[in-house]
Image (tube, coloured by chain):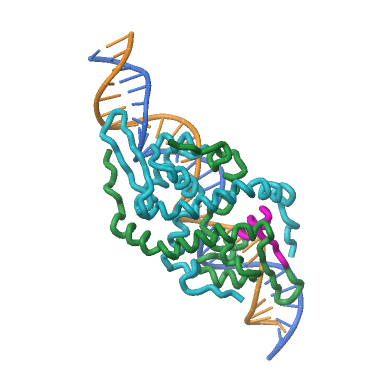
Chain colours: A green, B cyan, C orange, D blue
Amino acid sequence: MSGFGPGDPFLADCPARLAVELIADKWTVVVLYGLSEGPVRHGELIELIGGISRKMLTQTLRRLEAHGLIRRHAYAEVPPRVEYELTPLGATLIDPIHMLTEWARANGDAVLDALDADPDPVAHSD
Amino acid sequence: MSGFGPGDPFLADCPARLAVELIADKWTVVVLYGLSEGPVRHGELIELIGGISRKMLTQTLRRLEAHGLIRRHAYAEVPPRVEYELTPLGATLIDPIHMLTEWARANGDAVLDALDADPDPVAHSD
DNA sequence: CCTGCTGGTTCCTATCGGAAACCTAGCCTG
DNA sequence: CAGGCTAGGTTTCCGATAGGAACCAGCAGG
C-alpha cells in the first residue's frame, strides 16, 4: 500500500525534491524561523542562533537568497549594516516552518527521553 | 523586534533544537514521508526514494528508531524481511512533514526558476 | 596610529556522503 | 552438493562538505 504519485518527493529529479533538500538542512530551518517575524541583521542572527558560525550563516543565507526565499539589503554605512528578509516566496514557508518548530517544542523532550532509554535499540544482530 | 521566547529553537542546548536537527536532514524528511501511509520494507524505500543508498537509508532509519520516531520489525524469514513503521510519536510528525512536502510540490518550480534567474545574486562585492 | 565595530572570506582539518563490494543464511536449481 | 538467488546490512575507500579559528576591509573615534 503506497499510493505515492509521480509528483511526490521521491524520484530524485523532481523539483519538489530539490525544494525539500533546500530547506531540510541543519541551519536553514532555524534561519528561516529567525526571519519569520521581519528583517533581521546578520549579527542579530548570529547572537540569536546559538552555535552557528559566521561562515555557516553567510553560506545558508546566500543559498536561500539564490533560491529566491530571502532578500539581502546592504546599507552603505559604517560600520556596515546588512539586513535579510523573506521574499513573498519565502513567506509561504512560514507556516510549514512554524509547524515544524512547534512540533519540536512540543515533542523535543519525548525525543530526548526515547534516545535516553534506547541509545542503541537492540543492536540488530541479524 | 524579535519576540522569540526561551523555548524557541534558538540557543543550541534546548531539546527543541535537537529535535529540529533530527528531522532537518536531507533524507529524514523523505523517509518519514515514505512511512507516513503505513509500514514499508527496507527494499521498498530504496526503490521509492530515488538516489538514496542502502547505507544512508539504514543510517537514517537507525537514527529515527533510536529517537523513538519509528519502529523496526524484523521477521525471521528467508529471505529476510524487515518493515519499518511510525511510532505514535513519529505519527505526530505526519502533519508537519506533509505541509513541507506540499509546499515543495507547490513551489518547487518557483524555487528552480529563481535559482535559474539568479545563480549568483549580484556577487556582493562589498 | 591604533583600536573597535560589522560583515565576510580563507585556511585547514574532521567528518560525512555515496558507490561498490562483501556478508549472512537458507532455499532452489542443475 | 556446488552454485546462485534473495533481502537486509556492513565495510572499505575516497571525494565532498561542515565548521571553527584566524584574517581582511573600511571608516569613526580617541
> On the image, which quarter does residue B126 sit in?
bottom right
Query: Is A48 situated left or right of A83 in this image?
Result: left
Q: Relative to the observer, which residue lies in front, A124 or B103? A: B103
Image: A3 above or below B113: above
How many marks are shown on the rendered structure? Answer: 0
Residue B10 locus on image (x, y percent): 50, 68
- Queried whether the magenta region covers residue A46, the answer comes back as no
The span picked out in magenta is A59-73
Residue A85: percent from the left, percent from the top? 67, 65
In front of the other: A39 or B88: B88
Considering depth in this image, is C10 or B25 the residue closer to the camera? B25
- Please give the name of the residue rendered at 45% of the width and 62% of the height, measured from the top-left corner: A104
Q: Quadrant of the C terminus of chain A?
A: top left
Residue B96 spot, x, y in % from top left: 50, 55
Q: x and y percent of residue A50 in the render?
A: 50, 69
Q: Residue at x 71, y 53 (%)?
A: B120
Quadrant where the N terminus of chain A sits is top left
Task: Indicate yes or no whether the magenta region holds residue A64.
Answer: yes
What residue is at 31 percent from the left and 60 percent from the top?
A116
Q: Residue at x 43, y 60 (%)?
A: B19
